Amino acid sequence: MEDIKLLQEKVKEEAEKKGIVILAHHYQRREIKEVAHYVGDSLQLVKYFKDDKRKIGVFATVYFMAETASIYASDLGKEVYIVNPKAGCGLAESITAHQLRNLKGENPEKEVAVYVNTYADVKAEADVVVTSAAAVEVLKNFDEMIFVPDYNLARFVEERLGKEYVKWNGSCYVHRQIKPEHILEKKEVYPEAKVMVHPEADPACWEVADFVGGTGGMIKYVEKNRAYVDTFIVGTEIDMATSLKMLFPELNFVPAREDAICYQMKMSSLKKLYEVVKNLPEENRVLPPGEFSELAKRSIDRMYELVGR
Ligand code: 13P
Ligand code: SF4
């Protein structure tokens, strides 16, 4: 415990000295989130990085989140680093640009929406990028579409908007294992609790959920309901519960499954974060994705224009 506090102090000192902003996703380890200047969902993190005055961003996230920020970095005179460059995402890896081009060839009349959990070469093939927080709001402006790669998220938006998309069979191994029976087991212990579920989870969970949405949406849902209930069952990666506890220490947050762990996020550690902040090693630098930058940026900016935030 003492060691953690000491290392946290050293991270903060080093970041302050070098003008570094530390950004962590909600699924990150708590001891990292405690020293991050910003903790957010995938939509917010890029915005925080763009708006912050510091010139060096260190991302304690999976790679695609840092890559998305890197697309904006050079125009802003900024640099992006990642705590662990090997931190991938099974969902992002489930589709290649080549596969998406084939799908476009088979559906030439359809526009293309791509989930933010993809790499820049795939985003470059899209007309618009969406995050789970923005998907419904953005896609209500479109009709016939290809929407890849997360099948469950695409089904969720289809149901909300009464539309039908050409989908891809991609999924997140952390979320697809969350089933209604896990939620119902927790409901037996906490019958008054409200249930929140990420749209990447098994669609059968929607039936037993009070709220379905991304991590940022879950925070808003708790804010709205905290006056009526003090326990929330959290149907997403386990560390979302630690993010919520940091924000609302007086409330109880129960993960739907204790083994819903994103091992790629956990490839960052406080010690690694300290080494990156101290040495800014070249191998941790995330350079903009070259020829894909401009097209990917156009698709991401379209989302920001449509959500107005
Ligand atoms: P959010 O967009 O809700 O932050 O989720 C990102 C993610 O990786 C979900 O698995
Ligand atoms: Fe990717 Fe799933 Fe981890 Fe999210 S939780 S970053 S979709 S592997």
Image: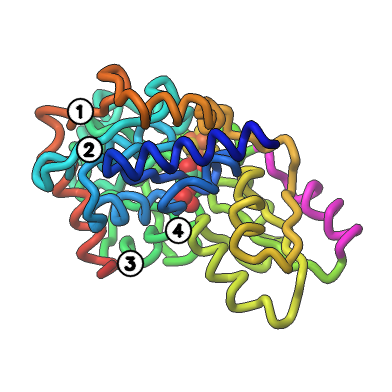
Discs 1/3, front = 1
Ranked by sequence position, the earlier of labels 3 and 2 is 2
At 65% across and 77% down in the image, what residue appears?
Answer: 225
Q: Residue furthest bottom?
A: 227
Residue 181 inside the magenta-drawn segment? yes
Give the labeled residue for mark 1: 287
Ranked by sequence position, the earlier of labels 1 and 4 is 4
Ranked by sequence position, the earlier of labels 1 and 3 is 3
Distance from mark 2 CB to nearest ligand 2 atom below 8 Å: no
Task: Please tell me how crowded label 1 is: few (under 14), some (14-19), or many (20+) other residues with Cα within 10 Å.
Answer: some
Give the labeled residue for mark 4: 157
Q: Is residue 111 visible?
A: no
Label 1 with label 4: CB-CB less than 8 Å:
no
9 lies left or right of 227: left
Task: Please tell me how crowded label 3 is: few (under 14), some (14-19), or many (20+) other residues with Cα within 10 Å.
Answer: some
At 62% across and 70% down in the image, what residue appears?
Answer: 222
Residue 246 inside the magenta-drawn segment? no
Q: Is residue 86 above or below residue 196?
A: above
Discs 3/2, front = 2
Ranked by sequence position, the earlier of labels 2 and 4 is 2
- Magenta region: 177-190
Q: Is residue 131 above or below residue 107?
A: below
Label 2 with label 1: CB-CB less than 8 Å:
yes
Instruction: Please tell me which residue lies in front, 284 or 42.
Output: 284
x, y percent for residue 304? 24, 60
Q: Is residue 308 above or below residue 83?
A: below
237 lies left or right of 302: right
Give the labeled residue for mark 3: 140
